[in-house]
């Protein structure tokens, strides 16, 4: 009798931004990651904004990329669109695929509150998805 064993990869989660309070329009940046660290994987960012007050003014997420770690960041090509978080209390969760750009492998998310009345708690996670899932 012969046993057939297969090795299966699993999802992995990388925390890029621990829960962070936003109370104004100052941009908040997640830790960046290098897409080259995940060859052949699908990369999905999960962006969570929990508006803590009904008088909150919301804000916007952007995902940016750079040729060097800490360099000049520009808008990243994504497999979907990001929308502004609403000006109301509640939790807004957005998921978006990052399309790797070998010329600009360093990627991070940025949240900017709409104005001084933004009241949001943010978290960002990277989900690394093996191609066999």
Image (cartoon, grey):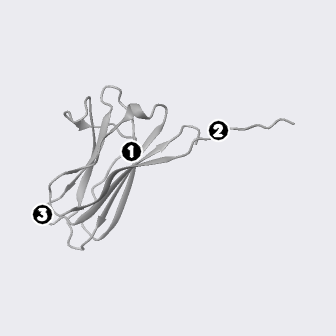
Local crowd size for mark 2, using a 10 Å CA cut-off: few (<14), some (14–19), many (≥20): few
Instruction: Indicate which disc, 2 or 3, sits on the residue closer to the N terminus.
Output: 2
Do residues under tags 2 and 3 come within 8 Å of each other at their CB atoms?
Answer: no
Q: Which residue is drawn at 25% across and 34% down?
A: 69
Q: Mark 2 points at which residue?
A: 7
Of residue 6 and residue 102, the one placed in the foreground of this image is: 6
Marks 1 and 2, Cα distance to the nearest angstrom? 31 Å
Local crowd size for mark 3, using a 10 Å CA cut-off: few (<14), some (14–19), many (≥20): few
Q: Residue furthest left?
A: 116
Asked if 20 appears above or below 11 in the picture, the reply is: below
Instruction: Indicate which disc, 1 or 2, sits on the residue closer to the N terminus.
Output: 2
For the C terminus, which image quadrant?
top right
Is 7 left or right of 50, judged from the image as shown?
A: right
Q: Which residue is drawn at 31% across and 38% down?
A: 107
User: Which tag is nearer the camera, tag 2 or tag 3?
Assistant: 2
For the N terminus, which image quadrant?
top right
Is 28 left or right of 37, judged from the image as shown?
A: left
Q: Residue 21: which quarter of the image?
A: bottom left
Asked if 56 appears above or below 100 in the picture, the reply is: below
Residue 122 % position (x, y): 29, 59
Instruction: Label 1, secondary structure: give it.
Output: loop
Instruction: Label 3, secondary structure: give it.
Output: loop
Residue 41 % position (x, y): 48, 36
Q: Which residue is drawn at 79% across and 38% down?
A: 3
Local crowd size for mark 1, using a 10 Å CA cut-off: few (<14), some (14–19), many (≥20): few
Tag shown at residue 80? 1
Q: Name the residue under label 3.
A: 116
Marks 2 and 3, Cα distance to the nearest angstrom? 51 Å
Marks 3 and 1, Cα distance to the nearest angstrom? 29 Å
Q: Which residue is drawn at 25% across and 30% down?
A: 68
Residue 66 % position (x, y): 25, 33
Do residues under tags 3 and 1 come within 8 Å of each other at their CB atoms?
Answer: no
């Amino acid at each position: 009798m012969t046993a057939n064993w297969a090795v299966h990869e699993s999802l992995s989660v990388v925390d890029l931004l621990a829960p962070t309070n936003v109370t104004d329009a100052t941009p908040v940046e997640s830790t960046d990651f290098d897409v080259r660290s995940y060859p052949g994987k699908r990369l999905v960012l999960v962006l969570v904004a929990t508006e803590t007050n009904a008088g909150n003014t919301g804000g916007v997420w952007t995902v940016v990329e750079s040729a060097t770690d800490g360099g000049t960041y520009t808008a990243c090509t994504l497999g979907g669109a990001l929308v502004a978080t609403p000006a109301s209390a509640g939790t807004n969760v957005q998921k978006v695929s990052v399309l790797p750009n070998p010329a600009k492998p360093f990627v991070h998310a940025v949240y900017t509150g709409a104005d001084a009345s933004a009241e949001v708690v943010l978290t960002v996670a990277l989900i690394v998805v093996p191609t066999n899932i």
